[in-house]
Image (spheres, rainbow, N blue to C red):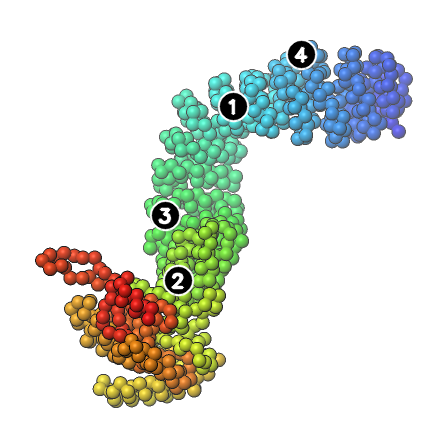
């Protein structure tokens, strides 16, 4: 039930009514009196309810439960002005309660309240109607209702009311309404700026504060800022900053000015009147962190425009920001660092910060505050971008170690930007070596596991920057960084894929890393990417090409082509054209397979004898249990080879190597051994002979012809076209495989070779003696070599340099015969 009225006690407790002239015992009775037809009863009842509700939220809830709101709603439009006034007073005081506001929204009282804001209405009605609207405007739905029902215009008009409470409630309501962009545009059209500026002169700080907060919100709009300038609003704001007694308004005034700085025109205006210098001076002498922080944020927003950056640089804003870095407040340090990042777009500012600000930023990298650390390293990333001098300044400030440590920060932004700074420093070799000594590749290997695309991208780019060094690539391999790098090729982020492709391109610079990348599936993924028009890019194509260029066995197997720049080295093997989707096996894996009737794998290993002995000694001194060449056999082979000397016949050498290889395959324990391919001493002799007899020839043409004849002689001599099928090379190869009990055959063992054997041998020897040639695989066991030769000058035109012509070298029918590329005879050689 309701509370009883006590007439004697002063002041009355909050749960009782003040005395009524009429008899009433409970709140419920007073609420029932709101149904009276008598205006005096209604007025007195409303007055009593107002006083009751004013004494606490509990009383408001009581009245809500008694249904007072519904009765009062009917009375706010009553004909009698006193009844109407008193009813609105109760609404105004009760609307602060959440549950009451909810019911008021359901009753849709806003339209009735707005109608009470007419100029002819009583000031008290204006006060409590605006108070009620201000309470309700906290909710978004009510904002929309007030806007749609035309509430802004009367509210703006009431900013000029003589009553300070009306002004305060009206400006508070407008402040809440302009949080919505529609209302911001509407108040501009209703010319809200002049009355708001007038409120800045109020003797009541709360009104001044609300006016500034409203100006801060609406000045985010460019057109509003222009109107603000036209109405001399900037002068008003600067005067507030210059007045010490308005210190409680400085933060908000600075926030409005900060918005104004975004416009070039406004910034120029402030500069011309000396206001910008005053503003920076004010920030410099202020000791209030919020002012310092907001000033730095304002500079950041202004610096997004190039013309603004130029103006700020002219006013030496850099000094102000550098000083803010020294302030013992993390929020100020963050804001100052962010402003420095924005100002770095101006080259003059970038040079200034490089001379003065970098040591302070490096110190902030050791901050315990992760946000400070992120802001500082982001500023360093911008400062060192395309600036070797600033990169040197970071190194001189001993920034390398804290930068590497920042790679372990908690915030992804800090990690990504630390990787960027280190990448910028790596452009200078001394710094790159220093960074590598800190274990950068191991740290980057960890970052490649990140789920943040920005970290992934920057880490991959850093791998590309440091991967140019062989030791760094080895560190990345040992740290297990290649696998996550390859997995990122599947990323849906274009920048991540591009940077990973670039990293793969760089890391594939040595054969060891290239082979490992291929083993991890990089080739298959890159081929898939390059088949997609949406995912393919120049970097993915370059990565695939570089990967294959340093893994020539796989390149030839997949592409069927080796260019003149693809130099075949020891360890190369030709296992034929691999089918799409099939795994490319290593030479060791192929050597472990049982003997089959499939095509033999031809491998190249022309290591000199002393290299083989060195491998043997290493095996004896290490923990290897057994090598492919057993020590006893190797020593025996070495002694016999030294005794027989250079005059040994080729047939005897071939027999000796056959015995060595055969015994090796019998003795090897494949599960426990460190596998090494057997040496091909016959191939080594071929190369030595070609070096002595062919290399001294005066022209490349003569060398090509002589080498073609040499290769043909070692591979069974010329073959007549009509007797090609009787040559019997297949049986010869099968006999070698059976003899070796292995599908892997050294090329030196092949004495009856067909097109692809001859073309491979020609390419191997040509690469060793410096003859540029390519190797091309055709169909039906065809393969050929292409060379570029310069023809002689036409007769009578001495000294004319002709462009080189491409020729196909005949190694089979007329060894040494050169056929121009595209000619009928060249096409016939490829097909027949």
Inter-mark Cα distance, 4 to 3: 67 Å
First in sequence: mark 4 or mark 1? 4
First in sequence: mark 3 or mark 1? 1
- Element assignment for label 3: helix
First in sequence: mark 3 or mark 2? 3
Q: Nearer the viewer, residue 503 or 817?
A: 817
First in sequence: mark 4 or mark 2? 4
- Element assignment for label 1: helix
Marks 4 and 2 in Cβ contact (< 8 Å)? no
Residue 369 placement, left or right of 789: right
The residue positioned 42% from the left and 63% from the top of the image is 475
Single out the mark in the foreground, 3 or 1: 1
Q: Residues within 10 Å of mark 3 (few under 14, many from 20)?
A: many
Residue highlighted by disc 3:
391
Q: Nearer the viewer, residue 34 or 287?
A: 34
Q: Is residue 217 above or below residue 230?
A: below
Extreme residue in the top direction: 120
Inter-mark Cα distance, 2 to 1: 59 Å
Inter-mark Cα distance, 4 to 1: 27 Å
- Element assignment for label 2: helix
User: Residue 119 shows which numbered tag?
Assistant: 4
The residue positioned 45% from the left and 37% from the top of the image is 339
- Element assignment for label 4: loop
The residue positioned 88% from the left and 15% from the top of the image is 22
Residue 787 placement, left or right of 628: left
Residue 791 location, quadrant? bottom left
Q: Residues within 10 Å of mark 1 (few under 14, many from 20)?
A: many
Q: Is residue 52 above or below residue 742?
A: above
Marks 3 and 2 in Cβ contact (< 8 Å)? no
User: Residue 547 shows which numbered tag?
Assistant: 2
């Amino acid at each position: 039930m309701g509370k009883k009225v006590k007439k004697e006690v002063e002041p009355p407790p909050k749960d009782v009514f003040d005395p009524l002239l009429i008899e009433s015992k409970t709140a419920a009775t007073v609420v029932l009196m709101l149904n009276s037809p008598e205006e005096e009863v209604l007025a007195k009842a409303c007055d009593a309810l107002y006083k009751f509700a004013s004494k606490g939220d509990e009383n408001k809830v009581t009245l809500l439960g008694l249904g007072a709101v519904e009765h009062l709603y009917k009375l706010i439009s009553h004909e009698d002005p006193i009844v109407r006034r008193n009813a609105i007073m109760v609404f105004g005081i009760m609307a602060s309660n959440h549950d009451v506001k909810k019911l008021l929204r359901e009753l849709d009282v806003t339209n009735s309240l707005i109608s009470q804001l007419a100029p002819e209405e009583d000031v008290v009605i204006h006060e409590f109607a605006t108070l009620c609207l201000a309470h309700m405007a906290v909710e978004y739905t009510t904002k929309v209702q007030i806007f749609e029902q035309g509430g802004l215009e009367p509210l703006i008009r009431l900013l000029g009311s003589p009553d300070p409470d009306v002004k305060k409630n009206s400006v508070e309501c407008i402040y809440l309404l302009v949080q919505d962009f529609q209302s911001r545009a509407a108040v501009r059209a209703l010319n809200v700026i002049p009355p708001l500026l007038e409120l800045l002169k109020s003797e009541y700080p709360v009104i001044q504060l609300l006016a500034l907060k409203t100006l801060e919100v609406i000045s985010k709009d460019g057109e509003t800022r222009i109107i603000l300038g036209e109405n001399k609003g900037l002068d008003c704001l600067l005067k507030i900053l210059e007045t010490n007694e308005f210190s409680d308004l400085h933060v908000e005034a600075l926030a409005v000015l900060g918005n104004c700085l975004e416009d070039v025109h406004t910034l120029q205006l402030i500069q011309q009147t000396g206001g910008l210098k005053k503003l920076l001076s004010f920030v410099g002498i202020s000791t209030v962190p919020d002012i310092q922080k907001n000033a730095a944020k304002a500079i950041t927003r202004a610096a997004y425009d190039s013309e603004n950056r130029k103006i700020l640089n002219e006013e030496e804003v850099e000094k102000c920001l550098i000083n803010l870095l020294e302030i013992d407040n993390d929020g100020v340090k963050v804001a100052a660092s962010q402003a420095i990042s924005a100002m770095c777009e101006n080259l003059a500012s970038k040079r200034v910060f490089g001379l003065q600000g970098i040591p302070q930023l490096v110190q902030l990298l050791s901050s315990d505050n992760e946000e400070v650390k992120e802001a500082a390293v982001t500023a360093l990333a911008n400062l060192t971008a395309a600036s070797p001098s600033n990169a040197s300044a970071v190194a001189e400030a001993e920034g390398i170690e804290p930068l590497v440590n920042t790679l372990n920060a908690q915030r992804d932004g800090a990690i990504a930007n630390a990787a960027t700074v280190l990448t910028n420093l790596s452009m200078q070799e001394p710094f790159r070596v220093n960074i590598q000594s800190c274990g950068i590749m191991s740290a980057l290997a960890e970052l490649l596991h990140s789920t943040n695309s920005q970290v992934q991208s920057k880490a991959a780019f850093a791998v590309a920057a440091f991967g140019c060094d062989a030791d760094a690539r080895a560190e990345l391999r040992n740290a297990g960084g290649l696998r996550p790098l390859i997995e990122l090729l599947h990323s849906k982020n274009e920048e991540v894929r591009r940077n990973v492709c670039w990293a793969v391109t760089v890391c594939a610079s040595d054969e060891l890393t290239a082979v490992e990348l291929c083993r991890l599936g990089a080739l298959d993924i890159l081929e898939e990417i390059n088949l997609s028009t949406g995912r393919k890019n120049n970097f993915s194509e370059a990565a695939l090409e570089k990967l294959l260029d340093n893994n020539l066995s796989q390149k030839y197997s997949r592409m069927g082509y080796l260019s003149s720049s693809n130099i075949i080295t020891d360890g190369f093997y030709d296992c034929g054209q691999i089918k799409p989707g099939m795994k490319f096996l290593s030479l060791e894996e192929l050597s472990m397979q049982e003997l089959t009737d499939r095509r033999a794998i031809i491998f190249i290993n022309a290591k000199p004898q002393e290299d083989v002995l060195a491998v043997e000694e290493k095996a004896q001194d290490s923990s290897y249990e057994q090598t492919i060449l057993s020590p006893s056999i190797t020593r025996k082979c070495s002694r016999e080879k030294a005794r027989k000397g250079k005059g040994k016949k080729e047939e005897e050498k071939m027999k000796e190597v056959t015995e060595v290889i055969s015994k090796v395959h019998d003795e090897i324990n494949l599960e426990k051994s460190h596998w090494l391919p057997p040496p091909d001493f016959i191939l080594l002799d071929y190369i030595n002979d070609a070096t002595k007899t062919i290399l001294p020839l005066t022209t490349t043409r003569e060398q090509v012809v002589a080498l073609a004849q040499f290769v043909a002689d070692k591979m069974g001599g010329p073959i007549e076209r009509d007797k090609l099928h009787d040559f019997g090379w297949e049986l010869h190869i099968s006999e070698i495989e059976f003899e070796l009990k292995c599908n892997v055959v050294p090329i030196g063992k092949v004495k009856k070779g067909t097109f692809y054997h001859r073309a491979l041998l020609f390419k191997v020897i040509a690469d060793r003696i410096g003859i540029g040639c390519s190797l091309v695989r055709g169909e039906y066991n065809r393969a050929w070599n292409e060379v570029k030769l310069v023809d002689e000058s036409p007769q009578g035109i001495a000294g004319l340099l002709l462009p080189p012509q491409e020729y196909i070298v005949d190694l089979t029918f007329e060894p040494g015969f050169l056929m121009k590329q595209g000619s009928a005879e060249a096409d016939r050689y490829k097909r027949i």
